[in-house]
Amino acid sequence: MNIDIISATLMIGGIGLFVGVFLGIASKVFFVPVDKKEAEIKEALPGANCGACGYSGCAALAAAIAKGEAPVGACVVGQQPVADKIAEIMGTSADASVKKVAFVHCLGDCERTKEKYDYTGTKGCLMAKFAPGTGPKSCRYGCMGLGDCVAVCEYDAIHIVNGIAVVDPEKCVDCQMCMKTCPKGLISEVPYSAKAHIGCSNPERGKPVMDGCTIGCISCQKCVRGCPFEAITIEKGYPVIDYEKCKNCGKCVRECPRKCIV
């Protein structure tokens, strides 16, 4: 009995010794050196892993920056402060970036639109979009206010106010999660410093728009003709501002007859 125990002990010990030696050799053979810059860049990143930079997470972005495959200012969440830190690590300079925030292109709240029917389905914009008329609101292109964007925002920067999603630009870090989540594509990024924004994405014209929302854009194009900098064009049926050309003069806001430019 004692011989069996000793034999078993020696066998287990031998296997353990073999595995240990094998792993030790393997660790040397397959050793991958850690890039010091990559580790420092990863430490400087906020760790949100939101994917807004175009990479799967902060670790992947750190590796890309360290290899020179991504700019030092690629992190939209960290913005300029993080870009400056990473630039210091890389021994370069970070160009001043334009702060951007999310904006919901819909002003059709509960006072400006009406409910066509009582929606009793699964709560959530993604599911409600498949309901008759792409949702219960009178404007089939507008915000349904069911809060999918609110649920994915980790920064408490977007809330449902009077039936529509509204972004707090002071809290928004432009992680773009709300943009990716909105099933109607109503949210886009805009410069933080911009004064004018189009508050409607309805591609229809005239009476159908007015029947759905008291503030909806009717594509009269008065804003297009009146802009002294040619910063507004009609795309997909509704006006779009080119913020590179916009000088924040506010003329479009004052002249819009429907008051859907804010």
Image (spheres, rainbow, N blue to C red):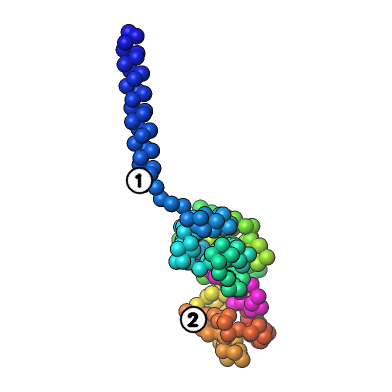
Residue pictured at 47% horizontal, 79% vertical: 236
Q: Which residue is mark 1?
A: 29
Q: Closer to the N terminus: mark 2 or mark 1?
A: 1
Confirm whether the magenta stretch covers residue 194. yes
Start-end of magenta stretch: 184-199
Residue pictured at 51% horizontal, 53% vertical: 122
Quadrant of the drawing holding the N terminus: top left
| x and y, in percent, of residue 249 in the image | 67, 85
Whether 257 is drawn above or below 68: the answer is: below
Could you say which quadrant of the image residue 116 lies in?
bottom right
Mark 2 nearby-residue class (10 Å; few <14, some 14–19, many ≥20): few
Q: Which residue is mark 2?
A: 235
Q: Tell me the CA gap for discs 2 and 1.
A: 58 Å
Horizontal placement of 184 versus 102: left or right?
A: left
Name the chief secondary structure element in magenta: loop
Confirm whether the magenta stretch covers residue 17. no
Does residue 127 appear in this view? no
Mark 1 nearby-residue class (10 Å; few <14, some 14–19, many ≥20): few
Does residue 238 appear in this view? yes
| x and y, in percent, of residue 219 in the image | 54, 83
